[in-house]
Image (tube, grey):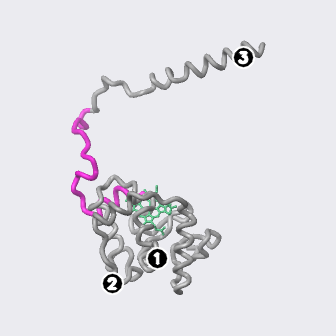
Amino acid sequence: MRPGLLFTVLLATTVAAPGVHARAMPDPSQTPAPGNEQPQIPLSRAGYSPAVNYQLQCAGCHLPEGQGAPRNDVPRMTGFVGNFLRVEGGREFLVRVPGVAQAALDNDQLAELLNWILAREGMAGASTPQDAAPYTGAEVARIRATRLHNLPDARARLIQRMRDQGIAIHDGMPHDNHNNGDSQ
Ligand code: HEC
């Protein structure tokens, strides 16, 4: 094929592509399946408890009890996550991780969810300091608005600060993953 013709064919393919996509969009006159006519309530307006919000928005990755999944780089929160409140910058980190900052919850609901996760009688257990102040919606709003730039580095720094305090790193992550934690 002559180069000029090849170019024309390629150009035509590229230009034609959006049309193909447009036709793949849902049919605007489509109606909901029978029995599924009610529009969905946005999660932030559904009035669910933190436990339900956790199951709906977090457990898919963190697992139902916060056990985590090292194979998917998800650290264990059970009996560990409260340690972030023991090091400088950790309190902010817990709000800024993408799963939290980008959850479909408003600031008050996020504060409530974090407090539920961090409760000493709950998932975080004794890893949460006894005198830890609960998050408020206003605090979450302030922290959530600033982006976390380098998550792995930020996390590794916090884990190192925990080590410096003699805190054992039982986050379930493998040894080679910056933090030399346990490998279960
Ligand atoms: C798509 C998977 C996914 C979802 C959904 C998710 N997370 Fe995470 N979360 C992670 C991963 C992976 C990390 C480890 C840091 C990172 O790489 O983001 C993490 C880290 C965290 C941390 C910091 C703990 C640590 O040891 O680093 C907290 C707290 C947290 N998530 C809470 C939540 C909450 C609360 C929700 C639900 C509102 C949620 N996450 C939803 C994957 C997820």
Disc with the residue nearer the chain's start (3 vs 1):
3
Q: Earlier in the sequence, mark 3 or mark 2?
A: 3
Q: Return the x and y of residue 67 as percentages of the image width and height.
A: 45, 69
Magenta part of the protein: which range? 34-60
**Which residue does the image show at 51% across and 23% down from the upper left?**
18
What's the mark number on residue 131? Answer: 2
Looking at the image, the residue that sits furthest to the bottom is 166
Q: Which corner quadrant of the image does residue 13 belong to?
A: top right
Q: Amino acid at mark 3?
A: Leu
Number of other residues with Cα within 10 Å of mark 2, as a class: few under 14, some 14 to 19, many 20 or more: few
Residue 68 placement, left or right of 38: right
The quadrant of the rendering that contains the C terminus is bottom right
Viewed as shown, does residue 43 lie left or right of 144? left
Q: Secondary structure at mark 1?
A: loop
Residue 88's label in the rendered image is 1
Residue 181, picture quadrant: bottom right
Q: Quadrant of the N terminus?
A: top right
Asked whether mark 3 and ligand 1 are closer than 8 Å, the reply comes as no
* Amino acid carrying mark 1 in the image: Glu
Point out which mark residue 6 bears.
3
